[in-house]
Image: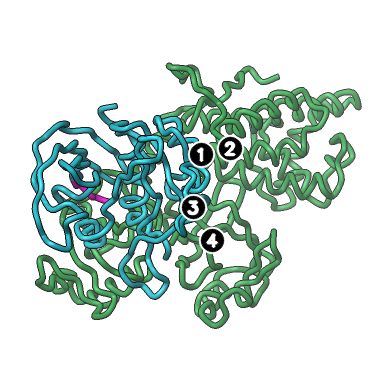
Amino acid sequence: MSEASLILPEGEYPQMVAGAAYWIGQTFGEELGTYIHNVYKADGQHKWFSELKQYRTANGQSFAFDDYKDPRFILGEQLKKDSAFPEIIPNWDETWRSTAFTVRSKLQSWGHHRANPSIMNLRVLAETMGQLVSGYKMEDPINALIGRCNSILNKSYIQPARPIIIDLPIDAEPVVEIVEQYRAKPPIGSRWTSEKPTRKLWLSSATGDVTESGRSVKNQLGVEADSILAKWLIYFPSGGEVFVDDKSGAVIGFKKGDAYLIGWFGTEPDYGEDVIRGFFTDKEYIYTGDDVQEIASDVSLMESIGSGAEELILDLSKKLNPGQRILITDYGDIAVEENDEGFVKVTTANASNWFEGHLPG
Amino acid sequence: MQEFSLNKAVIEMLDQGVDYVGVPMDLEAHGEEAGGKASLFRVTTSDTLDATFALVVWDGFTPEIRIHNFENGLQKHERLKSAGRMSIMTCKDDNWMVELTALKYSTDGGRPTLKVPTMEELDELVSQDFTELMLALGALKVGTRGAIDAETSRRKNYLAMTVKPNELDPILAAYTATRVLAVVKDFGL
């Protein structure tokens, strides 16, 4: 068992949720890594891990791990055609292999703070991992974790007055910081949960103008004013009152009582061209060579929205190889897993050229 | 209760027993004023509405809930200034009764007007079981007028709610749900 014990989350506390996600990966690596090591030892192959490392690097493959208990190592190694792991891992079959691929991708997202630390996302990770660990020591705790996530989500869990947020097996600060940054600058089209701005403007869908107390303020948006306003109207098609945060420039509109970020007054916050913004959505896709296919549904982007996606697919064709798996963040940033270390941004999609309903707005 | 939340609205009880002069719905055709006592309550919503409403018990006329002061809000909220007054009727057993009509947009995008909702639509407006909520707030019965007040006229199938006279919480909640939240949530669109 892992030295880090599982603390069941008490609610939507990012650091507790991220701690539980960390526990899932570490405990899996600890349990299966130890098992594999014992199998090799029983066969007299005490140095199997360093020998494997030599073999992989001699064949020009990357091998960034220094611990056989690293879950990403185990999950990645078993995917390789010449790996001995399929013979060793209990219950290994093609289903296990493909589920392990998904788990690996999800653990990468969590490890790089690209998974939104929400109870919903934690449940997805726990359930997916749960399919791999039948008969493992971690099976019971992971079922308890799934049960807790479900009871928090269906609001049947009553949280104690003082939730325990101590001794988490992760450095919680980056998680909290990222969640705070995200809250301040969420993706356009998503719910606005920060303080509501008070500067009131009127966005007219009929004229494409924006006014304040009856006077146009369009010129304050600079030379890009028309395209900026057109973009606001993608996310707030009926127009009407919008509210601007004077400090950040966030523009908010209300839909059925809830505040949504519909755009920025002026230029969008600059994150740097290569920076992947936001959290990965729960969908996975494959680039087929001339289209993008959602793996779970088999629906293709061209089928879904037609010619509106052509430009994006052309862009992808210059940067990707057919068969590459791609992920997308809620900001529309499309990324591929470049190596065992992380993700690389490919390009950016938006609500009008991506699968309907897969991005906010 | 001094203040309570109802989905995307917060209802705050202000002064009670305030002297009030205005035109009751009963006298609207003549424009005559009457006096009464009012209970004032403030409703704020997640989308910037801040308005005060008055439950007025008129001297000799049907009690009602009406807008008192519109402090702030979106343009669509201004509909509450001119529409959505709620009459408080007296039942056969002398309790108070309100009909649960709601401000509903027509599909052609016209202004919302009072229409008869289904019970499921009322549940949707408060995002929970409407009947359970009203009973928990102190209502006596929720159902059709035929079922709860032995009504036999053509209005017997209208949904309604009964409360003890001056039992304010369920009445204010029903008003807020069927008028304020209905506008906030673009009911009907």
Q: Which of the chains bears the disc numbered 3?
A: B
User: Same chain, marks 1 and 2?
Assistant: yes
Confirm or deny contact between disc 1 and disc 2 (CB under 8 A): yes
- Residue under label 2, please give it: A122
Crowd around label 4: few <14 · some 14–19 · many ≥20 (10 Å):
some
Mark 4 element type: loop
The answer to whether residue A206 is above or below residue B32 is: below
Point 64% across, 60% down: residue: A325
What kind of residue is marked 3? Thr
Closer to us: A216 or A61: A216
Q: Which mark is residue A118?
A: 1
- Residue under label 4, please give it: A358
Q: Quadrant of residue A35?
A: top right
Q: Position of residue A323 (x, y in %)?
A: 69, 66
Q: Which of the chains bears the disc numbered 1?
A: A
Where, quadrant-wise, is the N terminus of chain A in this rendering? top right
What kind of residue is marked 2? Leu
Chain identity for the colour green used in the image: A
Query: Between marks 3 and 2, how big is the CA–CA gap?
Result: 56 Å
Label 1 or label 4, whichever comes before in sequence order: 1
